Amino acid sequence: MTFFVYLIVSKNKGKKVSYVGYTKNLTNRILLHNNGKGAKFTKGRVWKLIYYKKYKTKSEAMVEENKLKKNYKLRNLLKQEKLI
């Protein structure tokens, strides 16, 4: 089975915000975020996918998700490069 780690971005009151997650179905998960049915943090915003990577196992994806969540330097670099 394939899992994805992803980074989505949005603007909130003029500031760039980001969210990192993992999923089995990337397309569906992004739709859920944009329809207000994703994580509580993502509700009420329009999100754009700017980064994703595939993993073979859920545990690999979870480890990488946590690394990306904690690596603000990389997240900010990705936001600057690809946001709106």
Image (tube, rainbow, N blue to C red):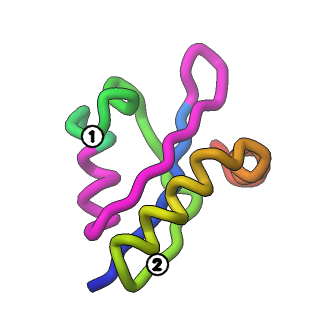
Query: Can you give x and y, in whole percent of width and height, for residue 22 in the image?
Result: 39, 59
* Residue contact between numbered discs 1 and 2, judged by CB atoms under 8 Å: no
Query: Can you give x and y, in whole percent of width and height, for residue 74 in the image?
Result: 75, 52
Q: What stretch is highlighted in magenta?
A: 11-32
Could you tell me which residue is drawn at 31 percent across and 28 percent down? 40
Badge 1 local density, few (<14 within 10 Å), some, or many (20+)? some
In the rendered image of this protein, does residue 62 appear above or below residue 19? below
In the rendered image of this protein, does residue 84 appear above or below residue 22? above
Decide which of tag 1 and tag 2 comes sooner along the chain: 1
* Residue 38 disc label: 1
Identify the secondary structure beneath mark 2: strand
* Residue 16 disc label: none
Query: Can you give x and y, in whole percent of width and height, for residue 70 in the image?
Result: 64, 45
> In the displayed structure, does residue 66 sit left or right of residue 35?
right
Q: Which residue lies furthest to the top in this view?
A: 13
Which residue occupies the foreground of this view, 71 or 8? 71
How many numbered marks are there? Answer: 2
Could you tell me which residue is drawn at 31 percent across and 42 percent down? 33
Q: For the residues marked 1 and 2, what is the alpha-carbon distance in whole angstroms?
A: 20 Å
Could you tell me which residue is drawn at 45 percent across and 74 percent down? 60
At label 2, which amino acid type do we have?
Lys
Identify the secondary structure beneath mark 1: loop
* Residue 54 disc label: 2
Q: Does the magenta stretch include residue 80?
A: no
Query: Can you give x and y, in whole percent of width and height, for residue 47 in the image?
Result: 45, 41
Which residue occupies the foreground of this view, 45 or 57? 57
Occupied quadrant, residue 44: top left
> In the displayed structure, does residue 81 sit left or right of residue 6?
right
Could you tell me which residue is drawn at 71 percent across and 42 percent down? 72
Position of the N terminus by quadrant: bottom left
At label 1, which amino acid type do we have?
Gly
